[in-house]
Amino acid sequence: MGLVNCPTPKEVVGLLPAQAKMLPSLRAHARFIPRAGPNHCVDAVALYDYSAKVRRRFADKLAELPWKEVDENREASFYSMKNILLHMIDNEDWIVNWVVKGRSKEYKREKKSVEYTEMKMVIEHLDKIESKTREYFARVNDAELSRHVSFVLQSGESFDMTVEECLFQTFTEQLYHLGELIALLWQENIEPPKMQYFFNKS
């Protein structure tokens, strides 16, 4: 996959309106491509490596806590910290292994959340999904990232999206719920793992 140069902020500000219209689309500048120098966009693999590393830190932190605290209903988005983490894992599974393969409507979770009765089971599930995701990234290319798929929600609402947009969606989903886990850990006076990019840069 080739490199795509991103214009610097100064270059963009200095453009006349007519010149700005001549820029390739933002999608082209956001192309998820291999790591490069300071004037190149961050790629999908780099984003995934970062979010996966942080998610793993949080999974390990939850594994240190009593199961009762992890499984407790805290009236959060998915009620317990366990369920929030499972949602993060399952969202990745759904998008990478089902949505981008045109099978959004066929997705079924391997287990219901209530069937996970210890963190060991959650982490084994995480291991399995991460392995499948990395297998997918090993063969992804520009043509695959540009391919359009139907992103169908449970409500039936459908969105026409490129594969790269789907991958960006699952990345942002991780960030939303990491913030939620941070808040829940703080409520228990527990210091969350460091999630900033510079602490988790590969």
Image (cartoon, rainbow, N blue to C red):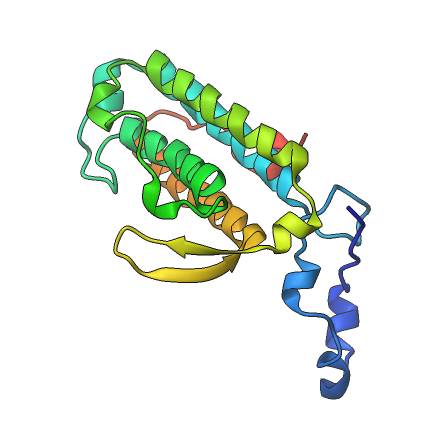
x%, y% of residue 120? 36, 12
Give the quarter of the image for residue 23.
bottom right
- Numbered label tally: 0
Q: Position of residue 47 (x, y in %)?
A: 60, 41
Image: 138 above or below 62:
below
Most foreground residue, 17 or 124? 124
The front one of 150 and 63 is 150
97 vs 119, left or right, is: right
Q: Quick one: which residue is furthest to the bottom in this view?
A: 18
Q: Residue at x 74, y 42 (%)?
A: 34
54 lies left or right of 158: right
Residue 88 position, x and y percent, is: 39, 36
Q: Is residue 167 visible?
A: yes
Q: Is residue 12 left or right of residue 120?
A: right
Which of the pair 148/90 is nearer the observer?
148
Q: Is residue 186 visible?
A: no
Which residue is more in the foreground, 1 or 36? 1
- Is 135 placed left or right of 54 in the picture? right
Vertical placement of 143 versus 76: above or below?
below
Q: Residue at x 53, y 24 (%)?
A: 131
Q: Residue at x 69, y 44 (%)?
A: 141
Q: Residue at x 44, y 46 (%)?
A: 99
What is the x, y in percent for residue 183? 34, 37
Which quarter of the image is occupied by the C terminus?
top right
